[in-house]
Image (tube, rainbow, N blue to C red):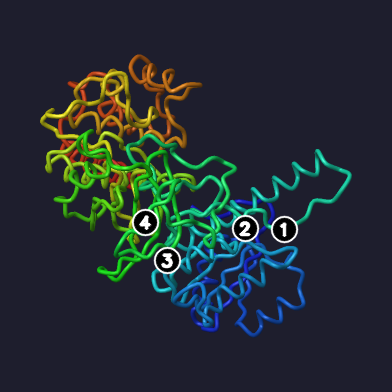
Amino acid sequence: MTAKRITTPPRLLVVDNDARYGEWLSHHLGVFCPDSSVSVLDRNEFERWCQTLSGRDCDVLLLTASFGSSPEDPQALGLELLRQLRGRPVFPAVIALAEDGNELTAVRALQLGAVDYLPKRLLTPERLNTSVRLALRRIEKRVARRLATLTHVTESPVPETDADAHSPLAMGTAAISVASKEAPTHAAARPGGEARDGPPPNARSPDPATVAISPAKAGAEFIPGYIIRLKIGESEKAVVYLASSISLGHNVALKVSKTLRDDAAGRQFLEREYTAIIAIRDPLVVQIYDYGVHAGFEYLAMEYLLRGDLKARLQLGVTEMEALRYVEQIAYALRVVHHAGLLHRDLKPPNVMLRDNDDVALIDFGLARALDGSTPSTRTGVLRGSPYYMSPEQALGEVLDARSDFYSLGIMFYEMLTGRKPYTGGTAMEVLQQHVNSPLPPLPHSFRRYQPFLTQLVAKARSERFAKAEDIIAAIGELRTAMTLSVESTAA
């Protein structure tokens, strides 16, 4: 798939002092965008370009530079260049190619208007293609907004600044930027599955200089052993910070409860999440480092994953082979979780994070329960989880087993293939009623080969679904074999 997303040929500019690397970038950009014009400048030439040209001469800028060890690092040339570009009345969509840097400089680059932030040493053609597609999509949206405004407001010209430069702070950017208005917060910010799948569309980026480190409205003491950097997410029950762990020597996602611990109520929600996954040591599940209570507030330190979640990835579009691979990876992750005696119970794209190698890592086990049925599926009258991905038996408040997670996986697979959720409605109850009573909309004709597999994943009756994760993995292997034989037969 190429990255051609706009009607006129895109103008791409590469800035890199390494001529050979610039040629490598130029070659792959020519493959992704065959109709584009690609120019390569070194940094001295780029500075002259900035002084003499208006900014309308370039649509996408791939800026290779040092981003330093922190946002205050005087050697962070990339951040300074972004500041200069942001001060211009017009500036292109910028993809930052970092020669060095870390999570903090990545966040700052996004705040300064970069569409994406890619560590140069990790860059691959596939990641480059994804990033360029994202940048061109940003241009499409910018032009559409401008045209819409011009259509309705004719008494004054529309400023040609990049409105997306102030987009909300988002989590992962090692390969795919999630610094767009539709990008979800890190799923760790959604404990218990009760918060929205993403932030409100008009949410604004928090100012790091004014973000309080207090987890509760009334204020709470600093969590010992952690240096709070930024607030990166919030839900009804918890706030999530990017924090540096003094003992570990690296950054973590620190989830802090917003209410005081109530010992009389039994185990608290962060304690349940910690207990659920602390014994699972597998890269397919997020790693938990620490749990504790300070000044009456629970906190949970977990792995900080830069690349973002599956929801953000799906917004860019995935091929059917990519969708099949993600389903297979999630099935492997569910095998790990189920073998540990747990149900996830809140499987959805925001709760599937992506590592640098594109492998998945399940997060947000606030709803996890024992497979043996020793804990009830829900309290009377209270449903937990996202209605878009909830199994019929979960919607009905029945005792759950592994097949409920498989149903959620099937709904996700449908969304990956079609780009839309199978069941929608004006209220959560309408959506849940469709899960219980309505047949699954058929897949488009081009995906009919997956229909039997999908039907078995999302059967209304549990007895008709796959019994265990290994069966799903085996079925995916059979699908791949059949597809290979079909291709070979056609070629012959």
Q: Nearer the viewer, residue 276 or 24?
A: 276
- Identify the residue under disc 2: 165
The image's mark for residue 221 is 4
Mark 4 vs 1: CB contact within 8 A: no
* Amino acid tagged 3: Glu
The residue carrying pointer 4 sits among few (fewer than 14), some (14 to 19) or many (20 or more) residues within 10 Å by Cα, namely few
Q: Nearer the viewer, residue 18 or 345?
A: 345
- Identify the residue under disc 1: 161
The alpha-carbon separation of the residues under discs 2 and 4 comes to: 34 Å
- The reply to whether residue 489 is in sight is no
The alpha-carbon separation of the residues under discs 3 and 2 comes to: 18 Å
Which residue corresponds to the image point at 65% horizontal and 67% vertical from the top-left? 37
* Amino acid tagged 4: Glu
Which residue corresponds to the image point at 50% horizontal and 57% vertical from the top-left? 211
The alpha-carbon separation of the residues under discs 4 and 1 comes to: 41 Å
Seen in the picture, residue 372 relative to 234 is either above or below; the reply is above
Marks counted in the figure total 4
The image's mark for residue 103 is 3
Q: Mark 2 or mark 4: which is in front?
A: 4
The image's mark for residue 306 is none
Which residue corresponds to the image point at 45% horizontal and 60% vertical from the top-left? 230
Q: Mark 4 or mark 1: which is in front?
A: 4
Question: x and y percent of residue 130 in the render?
Answer: 48, 57
* Amino acid tagged 1: Thr
Q: Which residue reaches farthest right?
A: 155
Q: Mark 3 or mark 4: which is in front?
A: 4
